[in-house]
Image (cartoon, helix red, strand yellow):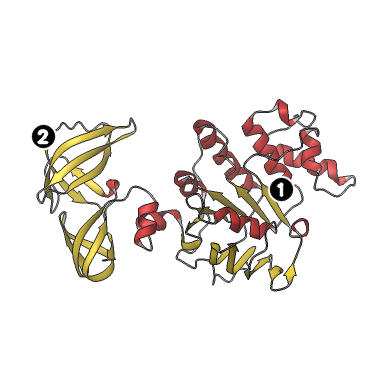
Amino acid sequence: MAQPVERHPAPAGPSAGFSTGRTPSLTIRNLSKRFGATPVVQDVSLDVLPGELISLLGPSGCGKTTTLRLVAGFERPDRGSIRVDGVVVEEDRTHVAPERRRVGMVFQEYALFPHLSVAQNVAFGLTKGRDRAVRVAEMLALVGLEGAGERFPGDLSGGQQQRVAVARALAPRPAIILLDEPFSNLDQSLRVQLREEIRRILRAANATAVLVTHDQEEALSISDRVGVMLDGRLRQVAVPEELHHHPADREVAAFVGDAQFLPGSASGPTVSTALGTLRLHRPASGPVEVLIRPELIRIERGEPAGDTVQGTVVGRQFHGRDQIVSIVVGDGTVLSVRASSYVRLTAGATVDLTVRDDVVAFPV
């Protein structure tokens, strides 16, 4: 049975982590990179705190992997600075080589040496000495591969190979671990299992990590904070709940989770919509678009407890653990509502709808 993810408290917001009183393990300021005339990373700033796991989430081509490669030292930025544990590794004419940055890297395709044993792979970045074997044994125990040291990567499953890659990255005690789409080569059930296991391993090692992923569920489920990258820019950095419920702008709202937008007229703390008058998370005025996620709408059973809007069921998609119900309300708007799979609804049924919480609106 999967264990709940333990999250360390961390600040939220577009520039989260800039003023916590703790020295960041990683500090990025105004990082920019072009390939030819194409801007790939644009003015990215971020702090990663000790022991924190931050995910950079975004679609293909958004700049997240390039950002990781800039931090690792595999690419040089056009502008900006990078500090690892307070030490400048990239700034103006300063460029510290990747192997001297105290940065561990875990790749999508594992990048293990096939001709070396598991133990030799883990030991690869360690200084020779009598403590080397002890450290290798510690790392193999940490990732649950005790007794596998003499085996070769080709004898292991994909999940086991990725755990060896994590052990190798952790062995030299780096200041920060970078993980580039580490689960994308695995099937879905193994991905879920391994990401929880890697989260446990990183916690047990008290490691600081940045993970790059395009998988929203992955980022939201295991991260302390998530940074959304779109078109090379870091648009919002926040704890998962804040990011999902209160996105900073319409583009982030549309990218993270299932989004539907209702036209509305805002007046200070409230907004008038096809779902009635709703409370706003942030005051607004004038024409707006209101973010309504399918799980934000409740289908009332029995006597409604408060103000409701009546609708008619016009269809549904059954997913097993839940269902998406299509409901048309009075002005003809069709809404998607996420409901328990045990709620029995048929086309033509009349239902009462309420909104569970305050809503976010974006000006138009």
Residue that appears at 66% across and 46% down? 106
Residue 111: image location, x then y, percent:
70, 40
Front residue (pair 96, 121): 96
Q: Which residue is mark 2?
A: 348
The x, y position of residue 318, in whole percent, is 28, 31
Which of the marked residues, 1 or 2, is nearer the chain's N terminus? 1
Q: Secondary structure at mark 2?
A: loop
What secondary structure is marked by label 1?
helix
Query: In the rendered picture of this protein, how many numbered marks are placed on residues?
Result: 2
- Compared to residue 82, the image places residue 137 above or below, namely above
* In the foreground, 193 or 90: 90
On screen, residue 221 above or below 242: above
* Place of residue 292 in the rendered image (x, y in percent of width and height, measured from the top left): 26, 53
Q: Amino acid at mark 1?
A: Leu
Q: Which residue is mark 1?
A: 170
Q: Quadrant of residue 138?
A: top right
Direction from residue 159 to residue 131 in the image, left or right: right
